Amino acid sequence: MSQSERILTSDSLFALRFLHDAQFSPDSAQVVSVVSDIEGETERFRLFLGACDALPGAPIEFDGDAATPRWSPDGTQIAFIGTLNGATGLWLVDVAGGATRRLSVDGEQIQGPPCWSPDGTRIACTRVTRVVSTGPRRVTERIFRSEGIGIVDDLRMDLQLIALDGTVETLDLGRKVATLPQFSPDGAQLLFQASDAAVGEASLIGGLTLCTVALSGGAVTEVLGEGWFIAASAWDPHSSRIVVAGDRNSALIVPKTKLWVVNPDGSGLACRTLGQTGNVGFRTHHDMPTWMTSQDNMLRVVEPGHAYATVLIRGAAEIHRIALDGTEQSTPLVTGPRACLILDVARESGSLLYAVSDLHTPWDLYRANKHGKAEERLTHLNEAVLASWPKLAVTHLEYEAADGLALEGWHVAGADKTGPQPTVMFIHGGPYIATGHTFRFDFHLLAANGYSVLASNFRGSSGYGEPFMLAMIGDWGSRAYGDHMAAIDAAISKGLADPDRLGVWGASHGGFATCWLVSHTDRFKAGVAESAATNFVSLYYLSDAPELFVKELGGRPDQVPDIYRSRSPLTYAHKCTTPTLMLHGEEDLRCPIAEAEQFFRALKDVGCTTELVRVAGMDHMGDSMGPLSARVEQNEALLDWFERYL
């Protein structure tokens, strides 16, 4: 099919608008939000301000791109992180007058979200500094580069306190990385996350610590230290405690996160969701440019004795009210076959402000009362665009693996299609995340052009409890193989999938699984392995996160060489007969492009149909957050391969 004949094309994505953040004003009468869209060949991130019954409201005048807006305590000003002419700083907008001004030092790079002091006189944020190298680099650190950053031996992140008159105080905390500052309720301390290494894996394998610093005297206290995976943290404004979404000493490289309370000195640690199946925090694999939205918005603590959190249960994300004292209690407030992401809680009324997405629609703003009732949809950002797109029919599947393990999946097809369809099985990344009720443009693109999509949550996926996740540890390929085949068989048995026209595709771990499957079965007519891991030995030595594989596989390649070889899809590539596309970003540091190059050559060696598409400017998350050209090229290559071979 030529591109002109397609129902949707790869650049149809650019007609969509995406919600990135939103916050109630202190009196709950207004909402400030960040919405992105495509203007010509440029992606713009704009601030909008409006009353709750007229959102997103009017744009706030700012010539650059805006992120993470936060209201002043008195509601007269909004602080935000703004990027203008290549420089990212702290900016302030006067709500009444609409004028913006830069607060941070001109030329310094500032990172958010910003946090106001309780008295509204100062704002805490993170300053990022780097030394520009013009000559050869002398590398001395074992891990010297990081996904999305590049070389990190010259990178530091320090906390700054910026007064409204522009006075800046940089805090010397003795750590290479200090980020995500939050004022204590009395304004006397800052809570922050810290690391001695500026690498991406620090947040994944317990390299981050949770600390406080006294603003009088500068004493630093480590609240939670070695072995902790920290996803989010917040002060309890009604006590001196800290609420944390995370886990400690988990066998998983990305643990099932729970909700904890702890005193600022590290005492009184207690888990408040020990018996809960769901994962505190949003972990669904999507392709929207909104990954930071879920990272910055998973936990809110406003009222005494309770926290509000996003909780992933099966394929849906819910909003729960979690008791911080007494009997363990996690009460679902906002539920349904969709993804609901907590953004804010009104201080007086307790009204909830949250984002909602499902397989049909990107994020929109919603509001409900503190009991999750009287729900109102506040925005319709893409209603007009989606009205012209082909509709989807979603079929929920429940089935069992060969060993009796209960599994679920979703079959997505054009609503006008009947009978068995040519079907592409999508395998999510992670692997300890999930797929489910969240918008993916690429699902729409494939379905509109005649290819249904089958997505499932195999053992290892998040949202089904810790034993379910642990069932995959150390052997991603063979442990999940039967689960993938069971999903295919379930779709065939329901008359949804054509057994003679099956494809497989996935990104990151999904790319790994694609390579594993096409090397172990000939059931698929075509495969697309995106951002794949194929050889654990080279991955250990080239990835920015080698300790992930040490933890997952039980040692380094020199210590357990047979395990590294037996768990790598490259070992079995010579058996592949399925036409397989290797689709990879040239800037990927988590799974460097050498992973795709090796598998590509191995397929060439045995005469298997293959191509390698190298996408310039795309890193590991580039299919959703990379340059516009990379997003188009990724979608185009994906659809083109299935048009040619499926």
Image (cartoon, rainbow, N blue to C red):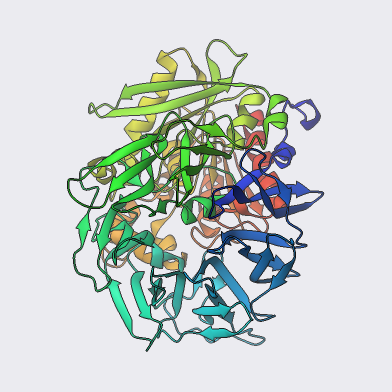
Q: How many labels does the image show?
A: 0
Task: Give the camera-side residue of 603 and 644.
Answer: 644
Residue nearest the observer in this picture, 347 or 299: 347
Nearest to the observer: residue 374 or residue 65: 374
- Considering only vertical position in the picture, is 367 above or below 596? above
Residue at 73% x, 56% y is 60
Residue 156: tell me if it is visible: no
The image position of residue 552, as x and y in percent, is: 30, 56
Looking at the rendering, which quadrant does residue 418 occupy?
A: top right
Is the residue 242 above or below the residue 144 in the image? above
Q: Which of 38 and 506 is in front in this view?
A: 38
Q: Dividing the picture into quarters, in which one does residue 80 lie?
A: bottom right
Q: Where is residue 132 in the image (x, y as percent from the top left)?
A: 64, 83
Q: In which quarter of the image is the C terminus?
A: top right
Can residue 123 be seen? yes
Q: Where is residue 515 in the image (x, y as percent from the top left)?
A: 46, 43
- Quarter of the image with the N terminus is top right
Q: Where is residue 539 in the image (x, y as percent from the top left)?
A: 43, 61
Look at the picture and state if 311 lies above or below 299: above
| Residue in the image at 18% along x and 49% along y | 326
Write down the quadrant of residue 588 in the picture: bottom right
Left or right relative to 434: residue 390: right
Instruction: Indicate left or right for 186 with 472 as reference.
Output: right
Relative to 90, is 292 on the left or the right? left
